[in-house]
Image: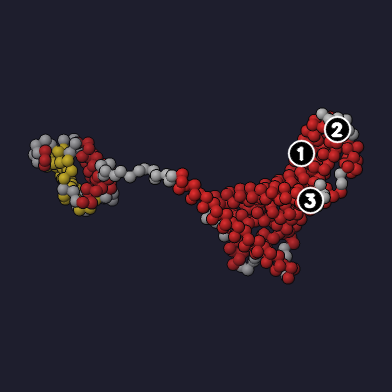
Amino acid sequence: MHNGARYSLETGSGGSREGSGARLVLTGPYLVSTIGGVDRNLRSIGEDLSTIDLSGVTEIDTVGAYVASSLAQKHGAEIVGADERATRLVNAVSGSAGGKANVRPERPTTLTRVPAAVGEGVFEFAGGVRGLVTFIGALIAGIGTLIAHPRRFRGKALVRQMELVGVASLPIVGLMSFLIGIVVAQQGAVQLRQFGAEIYTINLTGRLNLRELGVLMTAIMVAGRSGSAFAAQIGTMRLTEEVDAMRTIGISPMEALIIPRILAAFLMMPLLGFYAAVMAIIGGAFIADLTLGIPFLTFLARVQEVVPIYDLWVGLAKAPVFGLIVGIAGCYQGMQVKGNSEQVGLRTTKAVVQAIFMVIVLDAFFAVFFTEVGWA
């Protein structure tokens, strides 16, 4: 063991406890790379030890310090001859370093945490507003570029996104709207029956779905379905550096990825909203035929008589605005993904939440606005 750790046993010399046991002298480097040859022999020492002498140790690390400390604890021996580094390591591994540091950091007080959280929220909101304004500016610039150079417009990408946003959404939007129509008609009839006015269930179902619920529920469904898809798709492309690669080869991500998606949501939302309103009215006619005794075709004919045409225009006017919000929220959050895959999930969730929140806020604004202009 010329280049490794070595040891020797000396009897009859016990240091401060002379005569009570043998003296173990460690020499050479006691490192993780050199201690393997003597470790097993040291563990198998059967004699009582009174002293472990480290004065001959040339180098030591935490493994060597642990071996010396465990031998000292096992035999009740005293460690002597250790230099400053060896003493520090032995104390550290034996738990006798005397440190009083808390395992967990102290939690700031409420008076500190609350203002800090509010401040972080304000800065995050300000940064989000600044980023959104920048994104909308880049979107407008991209649209202007396509108007000036129409041949750069990606028609196939737009058609594909219209298929994904519109055609693929028809089953779920239709089923949802049909069931909502059933619920509105059934619950409305229950309440109106108290006043002997069940016939006005037709008015309630027709106006409510054409004016409000049809387009609103469709926007929420599209936000959860297509808005989240926009954020996840673009976010994944950001994460895998496909967006950067597109810029490198001279393709504008705004023209290739973002504008087709936003335009598809903008164009398909009025059609989906109208489709949803029609399916809801059909659902109301279905339940009215079953439970109220109002024939199916009579219900539909009555809707044409009692629902003013401007209710249809109100719903169709709100739809493209809602589609624009859903598309911008999804694409913007997707472009903010960076760092790791967890960001994709976080940004997708933000896209859906922000889109639904803004849709509901704007719907309330539209309700007040159209009432003020006399389209109540």
Observer-side mark, 1 or 2, equals: 2
Q: CA distance from mark 1 to mark 2?
A: 21 Å
Find residue 318 and report its horizontal and vertical position in percent. Answer: 76, 52
Find residue 232 and report its horizontal and vertical position in percent. Answer: 62, 52
Mark 1 / mark 3, whichever is N-terminal? 1
Secondary element at tag 1: helix
Mark 1 / mark 2, whichever is N-terminal? 1
Find residue 18 and report its horizontal and vertical position in percent. Answer: 9, 39
Q: Taking 76 as reference, is 162 left or right?
A: right
Q: Nearer the viewer, residue 289 or 118?
A: 118
Q: Nearer the viewer, residue 99 or 249?
A: 99
Give the residue type that dot 1 points to.
Ile
Q: Splitting the image into 4 quarters, where does residue 293 fall? A: top right
Q: Are marks 1 and 3 in contact (CB under 8 Å)?
A: no
Secondary element at tag 3: helix
Q: Residues within 10 Å of mark 1 (few under 14, many from 20)?
A: many
Q: CA distance from mark 1 to mark 3?
A: 28 Å
Q: Residues within 10 Å of mark 3 (few under 14, many from 20)?
A: few
Q: Nearer the viewer, residue 150 or 135?
A: 135
Secondary element at tag 2: loop
Which residue is under mark 1?
180
Which residue shows up at 51% across the image and 52% down it? 119
Which residue is under mark 2?
197
Give the residue type that dot 2 points to.
Ala
Residue 170 in view: no
Q: CA distance from mark 3 to mark 2?
A: 28 Å
Residue 15 in view: yes
Q: Are marks 1 and 2 in contact (CB under 8 Å)?
A: no
Mark 3 / mark 2, whichever is N-terminal? 2
Which residue shows up at 57% across the image and 57% down it? 126
Count of numbered circles on the image: 3
Which residue is under mark 3?
372
